Amino acid sequence: MGGNIKALGESTLALVAERFRILGDPVRLRLLQALAGGEKSVMELVSEAGTTQANVSKHLQLLRRAGLLRRRKQGLHVYYSIGDPTVFALCDAVCGSLERHRKEELSLFRKAGPRRSSPGR
Amino acid sequence: MGGNIKALGESTLALVAERFRILGDPVRLRLLQALAGGEKSVMELVSEAGTTQANVSKHLQLLRRAGLLRRRKQGLHVYYSIGDPTVFALCDAVCGSLERHRKEELSLFRKAGPRRSSPGR
DNA sequence: TGACTATATGACCACTGACGAATATAATGG
DNA sequence: CCATTATATTCGTCAGTGGTCATATAGTCA
């Protein structure tokens, strides 16, 4: 009885997982966030990301190879921009989910009633 | 939804990243997918996930702690179910994005035309 | 040409996380 | 009680990844 649950093939699943994994890093999210308003040079991104230039550069390569960023070279500068606006929808969805979860926790809290002293230990 | 990525602070960003990271694993995605149709026992999930029971159990804990799964214990069995249907919307969005990207690549391919001898590498 | 700047890359280390094997815990039945 | 079954957890290992430092590459200007 092999429960055939494979709506998504193995390889597709791996691709989806990879994209999620790429988004699963605060620095990369911060870079995407910084680029939400439009393209920026690596310099600017470095100053906003709060880490070294080498590190920023590597994260940018990763995002680019994943198709999430586009690259434009002009003189000495390299400008990166969002290559797949989907990411913002994803982030919004996650934010909404987290928000909802937080509220649920709070209401569960009230439902359960104050167990002993206040939780703010 | 209240959450443009521009407005995210450090801690929120970390939370979002964590959620993405949790979704960034093929086994976990497969578990979520297996639960799309309704709750299942760990046994069933093990047989569908193609890995060991210990491994499945650990992934389930992770998903549960993240609020993505719910747990119901009944006798010897433990039944897990989706606790946050948002994940499917996320997966769909990623799939759509990947699909689009694939098509773009193809059309770019045609635009660029067949390269001359040995573009390999 | 050589100096200077912006960006990318390689070497290396530390840490994390996935995995399997063994074991622990919990519930049920004899 | 003990045995059995289902699930969770601990432990050790191993691959992968993020970080930094140093260096390489590329473009500009004098």
Image (spheres, coloured by chain):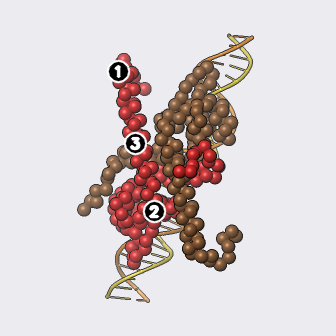
Chain colours: A brown, B red, C yellow, D orange
From the viewer's side, name the closer residue of B61 and B101: B101
Q: Is residue B119 above or below residue B2?
A: above
Q: Say which label, 1 or 3, has the lower sequence index.
A: 3
In the picture, the quarter occupied by the N terminus of chain A is: bottom left
Q: Is residue A58 visible?
A: no
Q: Inspect the image, locate mark 1, and give the three-letter code of the amino acid beneath it.
A: Pro
Residue at position x 61%, y 52% from top?
B12
Residue at position x 59%, y 36% from top?
A37
Label 2 marks which chain's residue?
B
Q: Is residue A32 above or below residue A17?
A: above
Q: Inspect the image, locate mark 2, and give the three-letter code of the amino acid beneath it.
A: Gly
Task: Give the quarter of the image for residue A49.
Answer: top right
- What residue sits right under mark 3 in the picture? B96
Distance of mark 1 from mark 3, alpha carbons? Answer: 27 Å
Task: Give the quarter of the image for residue B78.
Answer: bottom left
Q: Secondary structure at mark 1?
A: loop
Asked if badges 1 and 3 are on one and the same chain, I answer yes
Q: Which mark is residue A73?
A: none
Distance of mark 2 from mark 3, alpha carbons? Answer: 23 Å
